[in-house]
Amino acid sequence: MKDHLKVSVITTTYNDAEHLRTIMEQVLRQSYPDIEYIVVDGASKDHTISVIQEMEPRFGGRLRWISEPDRGIYDAINKGIRMATGDIVGCCFDHFTSEHVIARMVDIIEREGTDGVHADLVYKDKDRVVRTWRQGQGKIRFGWMPGHPTLYLKKEVYDRFGLYKTDYVCSADYEFMIRILKDDRIRLSYIPEVLIEMDYGGTSTKSLKAYWVSLVEGHRGLKENHVRFAWFTDGCRILKLILQFIRH
C-alpha cells in the first residue's frame, strides 16, 4: 500500500508566461510530498515555452507538459486530466493562500473517506476583495455549488462521469458539477477556510454579459442533467451570487 496519495495538479495557459511562472513557483512551494505537475499550453506565441523549460529542472522529473493548439480552456483541462497519473486531480490557475493547501486537502479526503474536497475562496481585484465564495455544503437544486478552483477530486470520479463538455463557453465546470453531484453519488469534504485567492475578471466574471452567458449556460446544464424546476435553481444561484458580493 502507498504511504500517501499522488496528486496531479493541472495548469492550462496561453500567452501568459509571467503569470505561469508565478503559478509554477507556488506549486513548487507546496509542502505535500507527492505532486505531479502538468502544464497544458495552447501553443503560446510569447516566451511561455522558455519559462517552462527554465523551470522544468526544479521539479525533479515531476513536471509533464505539452504545447499544442486547443479548442479552449475546457479542452485544455481535459487534456491535462487524460495525462494525469495521480490518485487526486485538481487545477491551479490562481493563488494558494499557504504552502500547505494541497496537504490539507489530501488529509481531509483520507480522514473522511470522501471522493474529493472543496473550500472557500475570494475574488480579488489587486489587493481588494470583490467577492467571497463561502457556501459550505448543500444541494445543487438549491443553487449550491463548490468553488471550482478549490475542487480536487479523485481521478476515478472523472473515469466514472466523464470530462468537461467543450461546447460550453464558460460554464462547463458548473455542468460537470451538476452531473456528479445532483444525485448525491459523490461525497465531498469541505474545508471552511479561504484556500484560494482568484483574480477577478476571468471568463465568467469580467462583465455583466459574462455573468449572463454563465447563467444561460448554467440553465442549459441543469436541463441537460434533468434537474427539475431548473428556473428555481437559477433563482437560488442568483441570490447566492448577490450574497457573495455583500458578504465580503
Image (cartoon, rainbow, N blue to C red):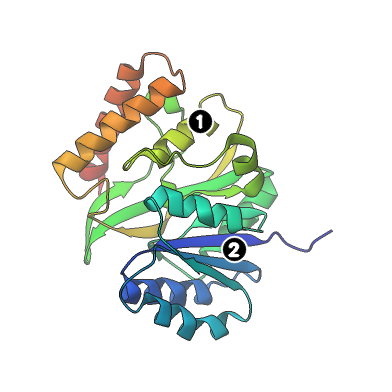
* Residue 214, numbered label: none
Residue 191 in view in this figure:
no
Residue at 39 percent of width and 61 percent of height: 93
- Disc 1 from disc 2: Cα separation: 27 Å
Q: Amino acid at mark 1?
A: Arg
- Tag 2 residue: 103
Residue at 39 percent of width and 62 percent of height: 42
Dot 1 falls on a residue whose secondary structure is helix
Q: Residue furthest right?
A: 1
* Residue 179, numbered label: 1
Residue contact between numbered discs 1 and 2, judged by CB atoms under 8 Å? no
Question: Along the horizontal axis of the image, is 186 left or right of 194?
Answer: right
Q: Residue furthest front?
A: 69
Dot 2 falls on a residue whose secondary structure is helix
Dot 1, how many residues are within 10 Å of its Cα: few (below 14), some (14-19), or many (20+)?
many
Rendered image quadrant of residue 20: bottom left
Q: How many marks?
A: 2
Q: Quadrant of the N terminus?
A: bottom right
Residue 181 rendering spot, x and y as whole percentages = 52, 31
Question: Along the horizontal axis of the image, is 62 left or right of 150?
Answer: right
Residue 232 rendering spot, x and y as whole percentages = 32, 18
Closer to us: 159 or 96: 159
Q: Amino acid at mark 2?
A: Ala
Closer to us: 114 or 6: 6
Q: Earlier in the sequence, mark 1 or mark 2?
A: 2
Asked if residue 81 is positioned above or below residue 41 in the image, the reply reads: above
Q: Residue furthest top?
A: 229
Asked if residue 114 is positioned above or below residue 89 in the image, the reply reads: above
